[in-house]
Amino acid sequence: MLMIQVALTLLPAGVLVVLAAVLWVSVHRVPEETVEIVVSAGEEQRVLGPGTHVLSPTGVQTYRIDPEAMVYEAPSGSLPVPNELRDEVSRVVNEEL
C-alpha cells in the first residue's frame, strides 16, 4: 500500500519533468539579424525571423539563410531557397531594418 502511495506521489513529478524536457528541446532561438529556414523530412517548410520559436522536438532542422544569395547551407551543401518562400525571406529581412 505504501508503494502505491509513493508511486502516485512521484508520478505527477515525473510527468512534469518529461514535459519540461520536451519543452526545453522544442524551443529554438534565432539570433538578431538572422533568418533561418525550417526543413522537415527533407522539405522546406517555413522561414523563421529573429526571436524565440517553438518547433517540433523531432525530425526538424533549421539552417541559416543568406538573404542576398537566397541560399542556405545544409549538410549536403548550398541549397536555393524555394521560390514559394523567397517573399517570406524578403519580408522578414525588411522587417528587421
Image (cartoon, grey):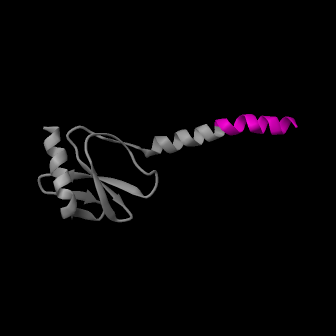
The residue under the point 26% across, 40% down is 50
Left or right relative to 30: residue 27: right
In the picture, which quadrant includes the C terminus?
top left
Q: Quadrant of residue 78?
A: bottom left
Q: How many marks?
A: 0
| The quarter of the displayed image where residue 38 is located | bottom left
Could one spot residue 71 in this view of the protein?
Answer: no
How far across and how far down the image is residue 15, in percent? Answer: 63, 41
Q: Residue at x 51, y 45 (%)?
A: 22
* Dominant secondary structure of the residues highlighted in magenta in the image: helix
Horizontal side of 71 relative to 23 (left or right) equals left
Asked if the stretch drawn in magenta spans residue 20, the answer is no
Residue 70 in the image: x percent, y percent? Answer: 16, 57
Q: Residue at x 78, y 35 (%)?
A: 6
The x and y percentages for residue 85 are 22, 58
Which residues make up the magenta segment? 1-13
Tell me where residue 2 appears, x and y as whole percent: 86, 35
Q: Is residue 30 left or right of residue 90?
A: right
Relative depth, front residue between 37 and 66:
37
Q: Which residue is depicted at the point 82% across and 39% down?
A: 4
Q: Is residue 44 visible?
A: yes
Q: Is residue 38 above or below residue 11?
A: below
Q: Is residue 4 magenta?
A: yes
Q: Quadrant of the N terminus?
A: top right
